[in-house]
Image: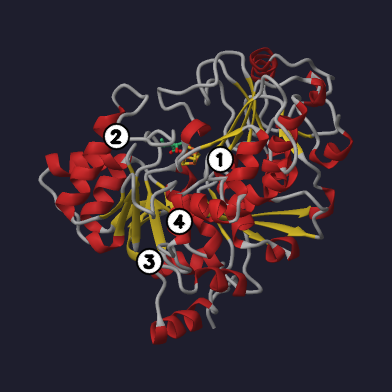
Amino acid sequence: MHEARTLAGKIWDQHVIRPLGGHIDLLAIDRILLHERTGGVALKSLDEAGRRVAAPAQVFATMDHIVDTFPGRTDDTLMPTGRAFLEATRDGARRHGITLFDLNDPGQGIVHVISPEQAIVLPGLSLVCPDSHTCTQGAFGALAWGIGSTEAEHALATMAVRVARPLDMRITIDGVLSTGIGAKDVALHIIRHLGSGGAKGHIIEFTGSAVRKMDMEARMTLCNMATELAAFSAIIAPDDTSFDYLAGRAYAPRGALWDDALALWRTLATDESATFAAEHRFDAGDVVPMITWGTSPQQAIPIDTRVPAITALGPDDSRTAYDNAIAYMGVTPGSDLTTLAIDAAFIGSCTNSRISDLRRAAALLKGRRVAVGVKAICVPGSTQVKRAAEAEGLDRIFIDAGFEWREAGCSMCFFAGGESFGARQRVVSSTNRNFESRQGPGTRTHIASPETVAASAVAGHIADPRLLEILP
Ligand SMILES: CC(C)[C@H](C(=O)O)[C@@H](O)C(=O)O
Ligand code: SF4
């Protein structure tokens, strides 16, 4: 009789080439994803070391981080040295025979958005990318995690990485989400409770009836935010929702191969008696629209409550971190965030830029206008998402409401040395990080769901999307 194991543990064991002592294993890698910010660097140093990419058919690259998102974009970037990253990635991809989704390729987009939409990630695979939100792809039951550029160079040359085995954590979310509450709110609710270091060294398996009910896009949003808990990664056992999503996509197996894959994928689950190093439970019914008031994702509150006083510090908050966050964000302890006027609204990023995110925001924006003085931007996560949105008229809804409608990419999720919202500008953003200057020097970021971003854009102040009907 085998010892009961977790899903992550099983996939891990299947990929061990050799234990290296301690908790370190040499793991076989099935897919490597690259983007021009870190991938270009890895390819360049690989060349300088005279090494070759071992399995180019299993490596995919895209342009997302530095490429600009203005309509009619070219290789020119707002970041002064940006073009060199694009060129290094393009040259490296060509030299090594790697599939590249370049600027005008219909497959281009944010790396964690395009991989699932083309079924590059599949259940049971190991996948790495030199990017911290690679855990997004664990939503498909893959072992997917972020690595550094140097490790990526090694992975490209060997299809293997040395990695310390993470501990297992299970987060069970049962119950039913209220209308208008989504995976982003759930993620912020969890981070608020566990703290931004709450899953350090762990791979989180998300499970429970609320997770099973989520579509793949919501599951990706949930897994994406595991980085903000400092997790090694996140994973969700694949089920019919996952298989239906993957079927027929560009790199999904076909015919008899699909049937074989499916039979294997159906075995990918945690054994009933497996144990986890840590366990947490949440009730979906407790989740309301969440928004961050500070400079860490754990500094999140239900939108209908007040900025906490110093006496209500979160798990990883020090007095200094609290004071700095209050000062940087220009908020007052005990105040109601929904009284704060905003300067900008941003919908995009690997957290919330998929078609369902855009649909939910558009449903609130339809027939409404962004408040005067608010700069509102929507950046689809991929060219495919953008085209799908245009085919169903979502672009018109965004544009008619006063949003800019951009090309796909990371855009203002982070400040790539070019476009910025400006110092002390208050932004409600569907992204995942809110540390100081994340969206540009001095910019104040409030993270929330796409619905909350849309409602706030219309109201001109931070707004609870449940109350949109009664706003002036
Ligand atoms: C630039 C890249 C390495 C970085 C990451 O790893 O996460 C970026 O995607 C981010 O979100 O900060
Ligand atoms: S969208 Fe933002 S968080 Fe996601 S990969 Fe790009 S920069 Fe990182």
| Residue 300 appears in view | no
Residue shown at the point (69%, 66%) measured from the top left: 212
Categorize mark 1 by other alpha carbons within 10 Å: few (<14), some (14-19), many (20+). many
| Residue 358 appears in view | yes
Disc 4 vs disc 3: which is toward the camera? 4
Earlier-in-chain disc, 3 versus 1: 3
Give amino acid for label 4. Answer: Ala
- Residue 141 lies left or right of residue 17; in this view the side is right
- The Cα–Cα distance between marks 2 and 4, rounded to whole angstroms, is 30 Å
Picture quadrant where residue 160 is located: bottom left
Question: What's the mark number on residue 75?
Answer: 2
Q: Taking the image as four quarters, which one is ligand 1 found in?
A: top left
Q: Which residue, given by chain and number where applicable, does mark 4 sit on?
A: 144
Secondary structure of the residue carrying tag 2 is loop
Earlier-in-chain disc, 2 versus 4: 2
Which quadrant does the N terminus fall into? bottom right
Q: Which residue, given by chain and number where applicable, does mark 3 sit on?
A: 15
Q: Vertically, is 272 above or below 156?
A: below
- Residue 214 lies left or right of residue 392; in this view the side is right
Give amino acid for label 1. Answer: Gly
- The Cα–Cα distance between marks 3 and 2, rounded to whole angstroms, is 39 Å
Residue shown at the point (61%, 44%) measured from the top left: 396
Q: Vertically, is 362 above or below 19?
A: above
- The Cα–Cα distance between marks 3 and 1, rounded to whole angstroms, is 34 Å
Q: Which residue, given by chain and number where applicable, does mark 1 sit on?
A: 348
Earlier-in-chain disc, 4 versus 3: 3
* Label 1, ligand 2: CB separation under 8 Å: yes
Earlier-in-chain disc, 1 versus 4: 4
Disc 2 vs disc 4: which is toward the camera? 2
Q: Residue furthest bottom?
A: 256
